[in-house]
Image: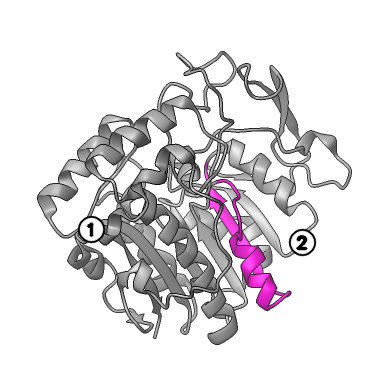
């Protein structure tokens, strides 16, 4: 079941708790008509599946439950999107997200560095794909809420004709994405579950922007750990990651992939248990397990590595400053070498 973020003219209202700027905000489900006020960028809450780019309005109050009429917005548990956004310097998070992240950092202090290294990798990966590999079309799966240097902004900086389809399942992501993309006809936001890749390929907005007869880049950036080997939805991580690149994409297409790994399987299992206990689906893998998932594709130099080692560029645009409560954790990856974000770019022969 998917819903378009681009052509529908229907709007709806959702009650949000105090702390979102107003008690009631109108959330647009589809209108892209120029001048429509219903699609204004309300403050939202991030989704669940691979939402790595932010979400949720910061508040000093920890909400106790989900409010009536607001069932799709998790207010009583952390989300990966909001926690990730905080580590990038974002303001869109709740106390429940910050508390979860601070608990996690006690056992895994490398998480702040890892999140920021992944975001910096996004810029370098997209730049390489456009400037060096000649890719002009992208599908960003599990993109979450917009942050600095989103995929279309980086791609279109190097080629104004680059086209991007963003994929996520959270209706709040739709509002933020449309606010950013309202005047950009070379992009679309679709609501679909990336664990069902057929629904992404068959979506009319995907078909309108992406020509699968030509090479395309598929981005699974910092989403692999949210994809389990087997799940209640879809056919597991291999089908999620490999179906489009193997069965649909043209030769010469690319797959950019990253996920949190641990060299010690026992420590990785501890991290998975911690995340799962907070309601966040998670599977930490070893680098060898990630390599097995991506077998048959051709790694682009320097191959699959710790992301901080993938063509580092000290002159690339910087991120927002680290929030003060997290500053003590910066540099933790210099001491702990077994826990990191592992990834790279691979080419379909």
Q: Name the residue rendered at 52%, 49% in the picture.
A: 53
Can residue 264 be seen here? yes
Q: Which residues are magenta?
A: 145-169
Task: Judge by depth and name the residue closer to the eye, 272 or 267.
Answer: 267
Q: Earlier in the sequence, mark 1 or mark 2?
A: 2
Can residue 213 be seen here? no
Instruction: Give the spatial CA distance, label 1 vs label 2.
Output: 45 Å
Please identify the quadrant where the C terminus is shown: bottom left
Residue 159 magenta: yes
Q: Residues within 10 Å of mark 2 (few under 14, many from 20)?
A: few
Q: Which residue is mark 2?
A: 185
Q: Height in image: 58 above or below 207?
A: above
x, y percent for residue 150 = 60, 59
Task: Judge by depth and name the residue closer to the eye, 164 or 337.
Answer: 337
Q: Are marks 1 and 2 in contact (CB under 8 Å)?
A: no
Residue 182 appears left or right of 198: right
x, y percent for residue 161 = 72, 75
Q: Which label was assigned to residue 96? A: none
x, y percent for residue 48 = 44, 39
Q: Which label was assigned to residue 335? A: 1
Q: Nearest to the eye among marks 1 and 2: give it.
A: 1
């Amino acid at each position: 079941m998917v819903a378009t973020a681009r052509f529908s003219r229907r709007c709806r209202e959702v009650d949000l708790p105090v702390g979102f700027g107003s008690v009631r905000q109108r959330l647009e489900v589809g209108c892209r008509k120029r001048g429509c006020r219903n699609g204004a960028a309300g403050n939202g809450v991030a989704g669940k599946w691979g939402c790595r780019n932010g979400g949720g309005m910061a508040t000093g109050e920890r909400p106790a439950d989900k409010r009536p009429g607001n069932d799709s917005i998790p207010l009583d548990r952390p989300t990966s999107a909001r926690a990730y956004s905080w580590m990038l310097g974002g303001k869109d998070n709740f106390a429940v997200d910050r508390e979860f992240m601070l608990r996690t950092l006690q056992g895994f202090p490398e998480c702040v560095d890892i999140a920021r290294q992944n975001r910096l990798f996004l810029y370098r990966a997209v730049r390489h794909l456009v400037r060096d590999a000649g890719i002009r079309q992208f599908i960003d799966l599990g993109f979450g809420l917009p942050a600095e240097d989103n995929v279309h902004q980086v791609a279109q900086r190097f080629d104004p004709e680059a086209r991007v389809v963003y994929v996520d399942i959270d209706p709040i992501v739709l509002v933020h994405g449309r606010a950013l993309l309202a005047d950009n006809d070379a992009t679309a936001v679709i609501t679909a579950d990336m664990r069902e890749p057929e629904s992404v390929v068959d979506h009319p907005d995907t078909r309108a922007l992406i020509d699968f007869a030509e090479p395309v880049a598929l981005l699974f950036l910092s989403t692999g750990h949210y994809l389990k080997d087997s799940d209640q939805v879809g056919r597991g991580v291999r089908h999620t990651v490999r179906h489009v690149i193997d069965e649909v994409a043209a030769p010469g297409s690319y797959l950019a992939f990253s996920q949190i790994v641990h060299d010690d399987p026992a420590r990785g299992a501890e991290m998975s248990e911690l995340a799962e206990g907070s309601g966040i689906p998670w599977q930490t893998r070893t680098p060898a397990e990630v390599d097995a998932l991506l077998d048959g594709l051709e790694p682009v130099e320097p191959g699959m590595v710790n992301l901080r080692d993938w063509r580092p560029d000290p002159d690339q645009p910087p991120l927002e400053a680290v929030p003060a409560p997290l500053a003590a954790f910066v540099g933790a990856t210099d001491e702990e070498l077994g826990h990191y974000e592992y990834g790279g770019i691979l080419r379909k022969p």
